[in-house]
Structure formats: C-alpha cells, structure tokens
Image (spheres, rainbow, N blue to C red):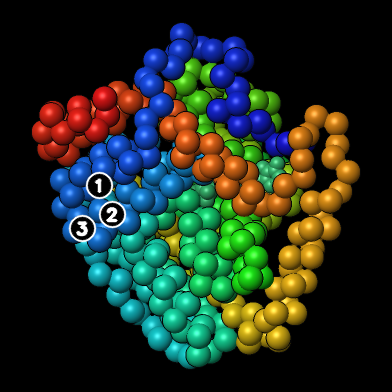
Amino acid sequence: MPGQCRRASSSVLRKRFKVGILTVPDLSHDALRAFAREIMVSLGSNDDEATCVANHLVDSNLKGHDSHGIGMLPTYVDLVAAGLARPNQPLRVVNDFGATLTFEGNRGFGQRIGRDAIDAGIERARTTGAAVVALRNSSHLGRIGTYGEQTVRAGYASVHFVNVADHAALQAVHGAREARLGTNPFCAAVPCQEDVEDDRWVVLDMATSNIALGKARVARNKGVFLDDGCMIDGDGKPTNDPRPMVDDKIGALLPFGGHKGSGLAIVCELLAGGLTGGTSIQPENRRHGGIVNNMLSIIISPSALGQTSLILNEINAVQDWVKAAAVAPGYDSVLVPGEPEKIAKGYRLEHGIPIDDETYRELRLAGEKAGMPAASVNAHLN
Ligand code: NAD
C-alpha cells in the first residue's frame, strides 16, 4: 500500500539477515487450535478461557495477522510464569452508570476478558441504544478487530481505542526521535445489511504505528529486513533491522501517516489509558512489566439512530460505490477494511497456516515450559 510499510510476510524474497527458509509444513488451524488450547489449560485456564484464547489466536493467523496469532503463546507462557498474566480472572465491575460500564481486568487473559466486556456492552446497548465500555488493566487483548467483529455480528457498530501500559514505549510520536507510546491500536466496525451475506461488515483494525511490534517479531523470526519508514534506531536514524527493537527494545517504531497517525496514537493513549481510569504508559505507572492493555469501546445500535434497513442499505451502497472505483495500476481490486482478512482466511482455511522455523521452535519450547507432555506437543505440531 502506498505510504505504508509492506507486510513483512510479503517480503520473504527480500534480503535476509540469516538463512531462514521455511522448512515447517503449513499447519492446519485445527491442529494449532488444539495445541493452543492445551497450552492454555496447562497454564491453568478453564475450558472456556482456553478455548477463547486459542480461537482468538488461531483466527488471527487465519486472517493473516501472524503477529497476533499463535506466535504470542511463548510470551503468554512467560507472562504467566512471572505472575504478569493471570488465568481465570473474573471481569470485575468497577462502575455501572447508565450507558457506561467500567471493568477491571486484573491482568486476566485479554481475549476472554475483552470478549466478556464487549458482550456486556452489547447487552447494555440493547436497552440504552449505545454503551461505553471502559476496560482497565487487561492482559494482552490480542487482535482488536476481534471485538469489532463481535459487535457487528450482533448488529452493532463500534469504535475501540487501546493503549499499552506497564511496558517499554515502542512508538515515536511525530517529530520525536525516541519512543514515547505503545503501538496503540484503533478499531472501527460497521455492520452490514441483515439480508445480504453476513460478512459484508467493515472492520478497520490497525496499530497506529506503521507496523505492529508483532510484525517486527515475525520479520525477525523469518530473518528478513523491514521496509523503509517503519523504524528508527537508538540514535533516531532510519533502520530496517527489526532485531534491536524486538530483542532489546532499542529504537522506535514510527507512526503511520506522520502527524495524523501520531495524533491518533496520542488520542488512544488519552482515551484508553486516561479516560478509562486505567493506566497510561507514563514511567511512574511502570511497576511490574508484562503487557497491559486498556480499551475504551463505544457500541452503537443502528436502530437507536433511525430505521435500521435504511441505514444498513446506505452502508452497503457506500461499500459498492467505493469498490466499483477503477483499479489503480499494481492493484488487483479495491478492497474495504476487513476484506484482506476475509481473503486470507479463505486461503488459509484451505491451504494451512505457515509457521516459520523460529516460531515453530519457540512454540515447542513454550509447550514444554507450560508442562505439556512431549507426545502431545508432537501430536499437534508434527
Ligand atoms: P494492517 O496494516 O495489516 O491492516 C490495517 C487495516 O487496513 C485492516 O483493517 C485491514 O483490513 C486494512 N487493509 C489492509 N490492506 C488493505 C487494502 N489493500 N485495502 C483496504 N484495506 C486494507 O494491520 P496492523 O496495523 O499491522 O495491525 C495488525 C494487528 O495488530 C491488528 O489486529 C491490531 O489490532 C493488532 N495490534 C494489537 C495491539 C495490542 O496491544 N493488543 C497493538 C498493536 C496492534
């Protein structure tokens, strides 16, 4: 995409810093789901949480976001061992006031905590027309588009602002040569007309940095350099090498779109880390480490705003109009946000999920560390 770093995954033919040919055969989503579920159970998660986290991770892989897929499991194993992510945390209500709900996540597994918080917000919006959900101090929430998809499946639109706290800053704001923020993702989700195929919803889901940190991790594991414009080194100079940032948090990721992406990243910090009453990335809030996500979500019922059929009809018509634009040279088609994920899912369901050698090694090790029997690891990953 113009003005964006190309995906690391599309750069495998580019210069490598090590020989990292993929030798692991693509794995089926079912095998990866079973593996992820078993690791989560070994870490202490109950069935519901283990299944929720496993599905979230593997669906991220299916949708092309390996950065937020099964490759996160080794980090989760280490976080649980250090007491920085906690299985089976109840979602605690801190405030319940009209259309607003505030929850404390207490470093519970974000995929399950986030799902439950959004479910509660959807339930509230059924009676209030719209709901604001402030989720504080969850452990890693994963792919934020998952929560947008959750609302559109229920027929609701939503926007989500997320920050990353108790973690080293990773992203430089516009004009700075050192990191001050996390990769602070933003998501907006718009439902589609009920009587057309049910996946015509639009979900824009993105890090406010040019690439998510996980994409630098995937590039490091594959042994490829990043494209220009993604990163600066410890001296503030442009670099393409993901290793210092991924391994030692040296340097900074750059915001997308200059001052505009940087502005959105700052707004995510203020709304998710400030307005929720959760934690911002300020150094005085750095206490334990790990990954803490805070999220401010606004969930809106179309029927509270007008005649649903007219509203959704207009939403579909806009999509048709945009997608019918003449295709620019170098592109196959015009897509709306969320479509690349649907295309990737169709392909990977059929052909399997590629796992690079380093991630494969890390996954096996994570299984061992979590206490999975070697026979189980082999059964799922071979
Ligand atoms: P990305 O750049 O791959 O995609 C961003 C958005 O652009 C998506 O909505 C996608 O559908 C859309 N898009 C991509 N190509 C398109 C095209 N050709 N035409 C139209 N639309 C297109 O995503 P990213 O910024 O690398 O983020 C990856 C993931 O990382 C996201 O799921 C995000 O939620 C997650 N993330 C999570 C955290 C966290 O702390 N939990 C932090 C940062 C990022």
> Which residue is found at the position 26% from the left and 58% from the top?
49
**What residue does disc 1 label?**
37
**What residue does disc 2 label?**
51
Question: What element does badge 3 sit on?
Answer: helix
> Which residue is found at the position 37% from the left and 35% from the top?
28
> Which residue is found at the position 34% from the left and 64% from the top?
113
The image quarter containing residue 68 is top left
User: In terms of sequence position, does the residue under pointer 3 or pointer 1 come before the other?
Assistant: 1
In this view, 148 is above or below 259? below
As drawn, is 319 to the left or to the right of 286? Answer: right
**What residue does disc 3 label?**
47
Q: Position of residue 63 (x, y in %)?
A: 51, 44
The image quarter containing residue 176 is top right
Q: Position of residue 254 (x, y in %)?
A: 63, 38
Task: Report how far apart the C-alphas of labels 3 and 1 lie in the structure.
Answer: 8 Å
As drawn, is 198 to the left or to the right of 327? Answer: left
- Tell me whether circle 2 and circle 3 mark residues in contact (CB < 8 Å): yes
- Tell me whether circle 1 and circle 2 mark residues in contact (CB < 8 Å): yes
Ligand 1 within 8 A of label 2's CB? Answer: no
Whether residue 193 is visible to the viewer of this picture, yes or no, is yes
> Which residue is found at the position 88% from the left and 43% from the top?
326
User: In terms of sequence position, does the residue under pointer 1 or pointer 2 come before the other?
Assistant: 1
In this view, 69 is above or below 266? above
